[in-house]
Amino acid sequence: MLLEIIALDALDARNAAEGGADRVELVSDMAADGLSPDPRTVAAVRAATALPVRVMLRTAPGFAADLPALRRVARDLRAAGAAEFVLGFLDAAGGVDRAALDALLPALDGAPWTFHRAIDHAAARAAAWRALAGRPGLDAVLTAGSPDGIGAGLDVLAAEAAAHGHRILAGGGLREGHLGRLVAAGVTALHSGSAARRGGDWSAPVDPSRVRRLRTLLAAADGEA
């Protein structure tokens, strides 16, 4: 079971590693649901932990792609040491923005990447999954199954797990009570942010004990699956 924890800085990344996380997603500005971090933060996080670090490539709220800005940010993040990414864009019709992906993926130089929760806001999920098939470097799709979070999307995730379980990274309001259902359905990767912080407060650092509890609960659920 892969456990990914959202980090905002080097302290979060160290605490995530101490608690037993497998990977961190590095972002800034969670009030905007996660934007690209400063390149200096990327360098600090890479120096602070040996964990894989997936860096958000997103310059504004929403899912529209500002390609000149994104290319510039991608270049700066790569120069700072970013080796894995998170990105995802929709076109005006609500479909996966294939043109944006075609334009940006070469800037990642073959780095592995996650298509983030844009899929939960797509006009048609099945079409979105088809549009992502075969994209070079894509090994995870971050999804809650619903724009309203995992609590509302559990049935969708359970239904999709048979076809896409190896790529589903379940996240978006993940709570302890969701773990058993997700693991039983065949989901093998989970993503947590506020649940790894005291009181779910984004101003609080990642709490290693909360990460450790998620890891323990995942192991127990996996043993029962």
Image (spheres, rainbow, N blue to C red):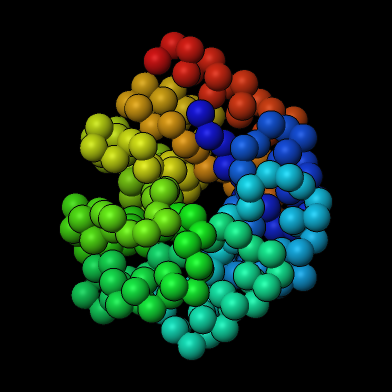
Question: Where residue 185 appears, x then y in whole percent?
Answer: 33, 26
Residue found at the far top of this picture:
224
Residue at the far bottom in the pictured view: 68
Q: Where's residue 211, x and y in %?
A: 67, 34
- Residue 149 is situated, as x and y percent measured from the top left of the image, at 41, 48
**Horizontal relation, residue 28 to residue 156: left or right:** right
Residue visible at 35% across and 27% down? 186
For residue 152, which quarter of the picture? top left
Tell me which residue sits at (49%, 55%) in the image.
112
Q: Residue at x 63, y 70 (%)?
A: 78
Between 191 and 201, the residue placed more toward the observer is: 191
Is the residue 139 above or below the residue 28 in the image? above
Residue at the extreme front? 109
Q: Is residue 198 visible?
A: no
Q: Is residue 180 left or right of residue 22?
A: left
Residue 186, above or below 6: above
Assign the C terminus to one quadrant of the image. Answer: top left
Q: Position of residue 50 (x, y in %)?
A: 73, 45
